[in-house]
Amino acid sequence: MFLDEKTWTGNILIGGEWRPGRAEAYDVVEPATGDVLGRIGRATPADVAEAAEKAAEAQRAWATTPHPRRAAVLRRAAALWAEHGEEIAWWNVREVGAIPAMAGFALHVAEQECYEAASLPSRPYGELLPSEEPRLSMSRRVPAGVVAVIAPFNVPIILAIRSVAPALALGNAVLLKPDPRTAVTGGVTLARIFEEAGLPEGLLQVLPGGADVGEALVTHPLVRVISFTGSTRAGRRVGALAGEHLKRAHLELGGNSAMIVLDDADVDQAVAAASFGSYFHQGQICMTTGRHLVHERLYDDFVERLAAKAAALPVGDPARAQVVLGPIIDAAQRDKIHSLVTGSATAGARIAAGGTYENLFYSPTVLADVTETTPAFTEEIFGPVAPVIRFRDPAEAIRLATAGEYGLSLGIITRDVLAGLALADRVPTGIVHINDQTVSDEANSPFGGVAASGTGARFGGAAANVEAFTETRWVTVRDQPPSYPF
């Protein structure tokens, strides 16, 4: 098997060797059933220190590797996602709780991320500059060195590969810390892909662990860039620690994205978009549609139809039945979701659909009569909940869409596309989709949010990746040394 458990059971990857971490290994648990799927190693800060030394040593040779060879590794990695797709998807469904459609989407994006990254080594990596001296002056982009990638549980393949692939392609080494809950899908899988693709040892190491491992990655002097995806709360800590140690930190954080349904929208189309935006992958996506802003003329009809659609969506174990929603990742996350739902109901919202759960399966939920102070409106839920609030005119829609600290994604449903674009210009977000919901991702497109959603578009597209994972160096050349006055 591609993901041969004999290789990684109870282990982490340091250098080119799968071996036990210095902390006790732990079970990989299937959220849908509670079954143990395997066992994986856990790293410590001491493991991080050793891995960083090995990464720095391997990176020096990799940075000077001819660009066609680096590109070939990335192209081969891309092909392997498809070649081993069935096995990887099995793990994604079982370990993460993703439905097969979500697992397939993750595999597609991972493949495309590697193909896009394969184009980076041959890009022009500098420019000539005018100089007042008789010399050749230029700027060059050089690899940053060792990059730490810290990825979350919810979409572990995509949220790791979108940093790992371009960082490697541009001549860096990577220390990858997957979330311990999804370390096989988000860690072991990437390591095996690149091992089979021919990546030299030491350039990608996998270090599952907790906050102590994350802190060690951020503070180690050999790590120069941190690519972090996770909650805004954790991202603030990472950013502060990185700043203290004079590191660059690229932060892709939380969201509470709005979808605005203008008064000329087709209600059925709006409801279809709303359902996907709030319920795909159980709402466990940073771009999930967390707030539905609906014009008062359409509001009652929209709520009624969305509630009927939500009530009809099948929920269950995606490995054993055809369902639309699988399990929430764990009990703590489920309880957070339910607390926001019940707290919102106590505050006056009406539960139009859902609001219940069985084990880790949370029913798709619609909250009506939401106000600006309703907890489900003000906070990121990260679950299958659709809070719906009415507005009177575009000015009020803009005010509601800009309420709160987040600025990740925005959807606008309207027959007047130009009006939609004009409205979007007044809502600060990193992503806008006209006549679509808020969840989308393509490897060649810049991705990132503003304000509490992160530090801008640091993923996707060649320009963003080059900016994220290289440093700028000024170089001058003379035919002979100049004369000096002393």
Image: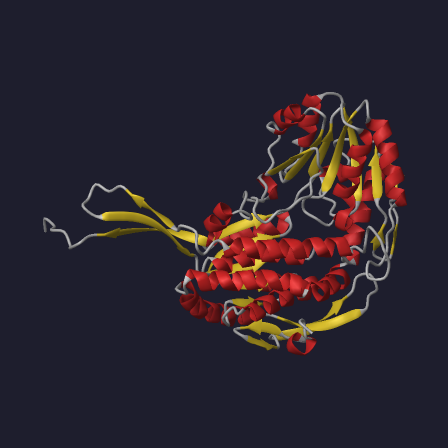
Residue at 41% over, 52% down: 471
Residue 215 to residue 446: above or below: below
The reply, left or right, for residue 385 in relation to residue 178 is right
The reply, left or right, for residue 67 in relation to residue 354 is left
Residue at 64% over, 77% down: 7
Residue at 72% over, 57% down: 103
Q: Quadrant of the N terminus?
A: bottom right
Does residue 346 show up? no
Does residue 92 show up? yes
x, y (%) of residue 51? 51, 70
From the viewer's side, name the closer residue of 349 and 160: 160
Residue at 68% over, 79% down: 6
Residue 141 to residue 265: above or below: below
The reply, left or right, for residue 335 in relation to residue 165 is right
x, y (%) of residue 278? 76, 43
x, y (%) of residue 89? 72, 62
Residue 278 to residue 157: above or below: above
From the viewer's side, name the closer residue of 62 and 428: 62
x, y (%) of residue 34? 82, 66
What number of labels is visible?
0
State which quadrant residue 450 falls in. Answer: top right
